[in-house]
Amino acid sequence: MARVTIVGGGYGGITAAKALDDVAEVTLVEQKDTFVSHAAALRAAVDRDWAEKIFLPYDRLLTNGRVVHGTVLTVRGATVEVSGHGQIEADYLVLATGTAYPFPAKHMESSSVIAKARIERVHTNLEQSSRALIVGAGAVGIELAGEITSAFPDVKVTMLEAADRILPAGDYKPEIREAISDQLAQRGVEIITGDSLSFLPPVDVGVLSPFRVTTENGRQLEADMWFRAYGSAAATGFLGEDYDEVRHYDGTIRVDEYLRVVDHPGVWAIGDITDVRESKRADAARAHARVVASNIADIIAGREPSATTRPEPNGSSCPWGPTAAPPRSCVTVCASSSAPRRPARSKERTSSWASSVRSWESIRRRDRARRGPATPFTCALCEG
């Protein structure tokens, strides 16, 4: 049976692993001991119920394959070296390591116990804080401001953005930025643009410890705790030198329309680490995974790869916590009005694990659009 190694157990990685579980000997390599649904990580930072529900075990993901927990040290060709496991060779390699981003938007710890402890510390500190600084006013910073002001309305939030406007990345309409700025102001959020810190606060993010910092323009800012909402990077630092020619300055790697890594036979990439020009979203990673799984299944069956991908319309959503109602609670902007062809879907069987993740996200979307407190998701895996 063909051997497939998938590096990264996020949204795309688990989709590819599940789709190939019946046709290949699948090894999913993931550093974390549980799946983390990062789509709700910011809600989890302010809501203890959600903090428990974003962690899902991998033990029921695969029927035939295996999940290896360890840090990928390097990749050469299609061979992966994993801490504590040595080299894992494969006939086909799928890279799905996603994007690294500062806590609490993403959790980089391998232990879910540590991750949950950090979330609890942030929540406890927010309960005792009166001033919070968010450095960065992109989509993540805005979402975080909305979550904090919804859960802790007495906390005074200040947002500092180096660019001359909020949402600096992306082709947003001016009225969108104006509407969001107005809503932030209504919640008492102070927005400072065109300025940056002269130095980072002398405390870790999410830690309660009053501090004073100075901006490049000479403004003094005081807060009890702070959060960093900038600095995403494609997680491809583990790739060996033979990948240097296909790795861009931002860490993304070159792929063709079949999502094969250019000039690397048998190696595929999905999600945030690809240089596909589209918004980096969980649904895009899953769509990539279906394309790759279909193509690998084709090759195993002796056929030519047939599934291709085309970028989806760019979009962004800015939730404002559980109590706001649309259309003011969530703004979606598409940069293109065209309707690109959907990627071919592989014949993946329905699983309680994958269904749990999809159902969880559906509940989260519905929760954004209703008034009242969030409805925690009860996972079939957690409840047995």
Image: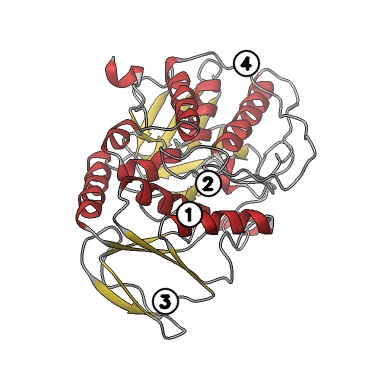
Mark closest to the chain's N terminus, 2 or 4: 2
Q: Nearer the viewer, mark 3 or mark 4?
A: 3
The answer to whether the residues at label 2 and label 1 have Cβ atoms under 8 Å apart is: yes
Mark closest to the chain's N terminus, 3 or 1: 1
Numbered label attached to residue 142: 1
Query: In the figure, is residue 203 to the left or right of 304?
Result: left
Q: State the residue lying farthest toward the bottom.
A: 218
Query: Badge 4 is on which residue?
Result: 347
The answer to whether the residues at label 3 and label 1 have Cβ atoms under 8 Å apart is: no
The answer to whether the residues at label 2 and label 4 have Cβ atoms under 8 Å apart is: no
Q: Secondary structure at mark 2?
A: loop
Q: Nearer the viewer, mark 2 or mark 4?
A: 2
Q: Is residue 50 above or below residue 154?
A: above
Q: Secondary structure at mark 3?
A: loop
Looking at the rendered image, the quarter that the N terminus falls into is top right
Callout 4 amino acid: Lys
Q: State the residue lying farthest toward the right.
A: 338
Q: Position of residue 189 (x, y in %)?
A: 42, 61
Query: Badge 2 is on which residue?
Result: 318
Residue 283, by quadrant, is top right
